[in-house]
Image (cartoon, helix red, strand yellow):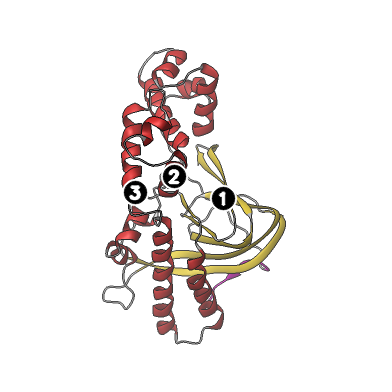
Amino acid sequence: MVNVKGLINFKNFYLNPVAYYSKVWTNFDMQYHSHGYFEVMYVEEGSCDILLYNKVNEEKTGTETITLGKDMVMFINSDVFHRLVVKNYVKINNIEFERIKTAPGGALPDFISVAERTETLKRFLSVNSCYYVIKNAGVVLSPIKRIHSELSEGLCSPEDRKILLNSYIAELFIKMAAVFYAVSKTGPAYVKKVLHYINNHYTDEISLDEMIKPLGISKGYLRKIVKQETGKTILDIINEHRITRAKQLISNTEMPLIDIAVECGFNNRQNFYYIFKQITGQNPQAFRQKGADLYSFGEGYVNDDYQSDSETHVENKK
């Protein structure tokens, strides 16, 4: 789930808010869209679903659905196809940012240079994911509202306003990163060991009991910290390793697909086909016929035109 257009891949820029809203949505279904902006969505009340997908050679792949509830934040990187679906009720505070090139000797610092001096934010951005989902993130509501307030009121001079907004944006991202990694002091170390274990045993029949033996933690806690650190479940990570290996074997060998399934740790053909299509968007046979196509989620995005609703999507023209 790597997004080649994530913030970490650019240098010498600052983030400028270009659009924002604070709105209640009821029974709403937005069309799929993508844009070059970086988007932060905070759910203040209720819940909603965010649907995402990749597009490679005009084919939709890697579809995912993320459910956001109260006090959850989702950061969506640029050029990611996404869609908001509200089944009942939700109140969302939203900001979209564009990258603006920093001027030499200018008043606004390079965003990445700030991140590199802030260990947690540097780590957060280095994951370079298409999206981040952050739970229990009520602490980020204050900087979001301060950004909204400054954009709507505009009490300062234009130059002072840019500096003020820049400080609020830095606060927002630093707090998002802090909450994202606030599992425990030992959580990241545990996750590193688990990921190492999976990398060495993904073709085997992996047991959670075996994973937790050397760690001395519960299975529930292990699931929690892996999800919070990586944004994925343990099974998701195992399946991604298995499918990556399967794609290599399909592309580079003449092995029968059933043998590849067994080689990669799947216990039956049906499960292999299901997981393969779920991750790649096509079945193994079609993948072999088309040849090596190793795009991962987050690569190959094609922008669609984004038509915003003027009543719900406030463009910042100041």
> Tag 3: residue type?
Pro
- Front label number (1 vs 2): 2
Where residue 165 appears, as percent x and y from the top left, is 44, 76
Circle number at residue 279: none
Q: Is residue 90 left or right of residue 268?
A: right
Dot 3 or dot 2, earlier in sequence: 3
Residue 199 location (% of width, % of height): 33, 32
* The one of 292 and 266 positioned closer to us in this rendering: 266
Q: Residue at x 53, y 32 (%)?
A: 278
Task: Give the quarter of the figure containing the N terminus.
Answer: top left
Q: Alpha-carbon neighbours of circle 3 within 10 Å: few (<14), some, or many (≥20)? A: some
198 vs 311, left or right, is left
Residue 83 % position (x, y)? 60, 51
> Mark 3 or mark 1: which comes first in sequence?
1
Give the residue number, with chain letter if any, for mark 1: 82
* Residue position marked by numbered label 3 in the rendering: 188
Q: Which residues are magenta?
A: 311-318
- Kindly identify the residue that appears in the image at 60 percent across and 70 percent down: 314
296 is higher (above) or lower (below) than 257: below
Q: Are marks 3 and 1 in contact (CB under 8 Å)?
A: no
- CA distance for labels 3 and 1: 29 Å
Give the overall secondary structure of the magenta segment.
loop
- Residue 192, compared with residue 290, is above or below; it is below
